[in-house]
Amino acid sequence: MKIPEEGTPPKDVLEKMKDMRKDDADWRAGKTFSLVYFLDDEHTDLLKNAYTMYFSENGLSPMAFSSLRRFETEVISMVADMLGGVPGAIGSMTSGGTESILMAVKSARQWARVNKPGIEKPEVILPITVHPAFEKAMHYFDLVPVHIPVRDDFRADVEEAKKAINENTILMVGSAPAYPHGVVDPIEDLASIALEKGLLFHVDSCLGGFLLPWLKKLGYPIPAFDLSVNGVTSISADIHKYGFASKGASCVIYKDEELRKHQYFAYTQWPGGLYASPSATGTRPGGAIAAAWATLQHLGQDGYLATAKKIMAITERFKSGIEKIDGLRILGKPDMSVFAFTTDKGDIFALGDELENRGWHLDRQPGSLHMMITPVHENIVDDFLSDLEEAANKVASMPAGDMSGMAAMYGMVAALPDQGQAKDMIVEFFNQLMKPGA
């Protein structure tokens, strides 16, 4: 494919784009349960206006655009207050949860080089349920992941974490909540171990950071998880998830500025002049920073509280409806609006395919289907549950091994004796998927 020899009028370009998106997942109708966090049209209009106001500005230099610098520092201050309010807490905005996690891990590595200089192969203790962005960080920064199991309730095993610590350990991690089952790890217990051993401790609250604090204020039994917990040294939270800002807007918050300094990169020998950047990216879209600030100003605490209350009411309708369907059950006891369910009658991936045939898009996990609930799902609960019951009954009557689509692919991956082969297969799948015309 080549760049067209002649340009196309803007109206025609936009029409073509509208046509190309006709087969995309219909998130506006509540047909998806991940990827998009939609509040309402009024709020979306605010995001568009705030973003386009700073469409061309670049957040790389805090000296060129003082308003962007103010937006970012005020966002960080507000988020730090929401997540524990520890005096001296400070951080940075990033492009998303993955970058926030990368920066937290990179900071831990740099901290260890100063405070634990004898370590040649730093190790990081990770529950098996942490987000794969941590595995990416291990790969990028040449660190050693040490995986610990979870208990029967899907929360990190504290005793196994304690056993995993050795002279090479620099960082421990917990999730609030862990994506697969929506449960908060025992952060207080894990962080106290890290504190006792002189280690850093990061809380990945990218998913729950903008919902758990408000649920706690509403009286939900949310376990302690934020910077107020003794031993927690950093935390990440995505503003573009349950904060309802534009993509990509996340933040990583540290307990003090000394730790944040380890995140920064500076280079002084470039013929182009002095160079420094606070995070992984160089150019930083000013629109994402501006829209995040506008979101916090617009919604306020009362808006977030009302939204959290609505989300949990919708979530309870889904959960109770699912558990009334013969053979289906929720896994564990989710702490918020993220959960997984499975079936005892038939293949869960075949059930996912049946729902897909009915227009519903649920993420697949080993042995379960995954759901994240937002306000857009309020009006489709009954329709979904009706389709789910029909699909569950159909799958329950299917002959064993009668699978196709995603169910067949997941089954094949699970059956491979060498998971290295599974990685190669997934890489090749993406390689083919991202070819022009695929």
Image (cartoon, helix red, strand yellow):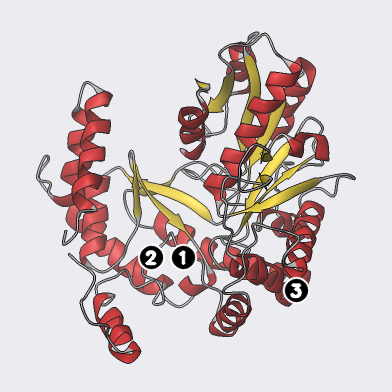
Q: Which residue in the rendered view is the most extreme toward the front? A: 271
The residues tagged by marks 2 and 3 sit, at their Cα atoms, a distance apart of 28 Å
Image height of 340 relative to 146, above or below? below
Q: In which quarter of the image is residue 346?
A: top left
Amino acid identity at mark 3: Gln
**Quadrant hosting residue 325:** bottom left
Which amino acid, mark 1? Answer: Val
Tell me the SS state at disc 3: helix
What residue is shown with label 3?
Answer: 297
Q: Nearer the viewer, residue 175 or 354?
A: 175
16, 77: nearer the viewer: 16
Please give left or right for residue 123 compared with residue 115 in the image.
left
Residue 136 in percent (x, y) is at 46, 35
The residue under label 2 is 32
- Mark 2, Cα crowd under 10 Å, few <14 / some 14-19 / many 20+, is many
Q: Which of marks 3 and 1 is in front?
A: 3
Q: Does the residue at mark 1 contact the one at mark 2 (Cβ under 8 Å)?
A: yes
User: Which residue does the image show at 81% across and 35% down from the upper left?
Assistant: 258
Q: In this view, does 81 lie above or below 279?
A: below
Residue annotated with mark 1: 36
Is 193 left or right of 391, judged from the image as shown? right
Where, quadrant-wise, is the N terminus in this rendering? bottom left
Inspect the image, locate mark 2, and give the three-letter code of the amino acid beneath it. Answer: Thr
Label at residue 116 = none
Disc 2 element:
loop
Label 3 Cα crowd, 10 Å radius (few <14 / some 14-19 / many 20+): few
- Left/right of residue 184 with respect to residue 424 in the rendered view: right
Mark 1 lies on a secondary structure that is: loop
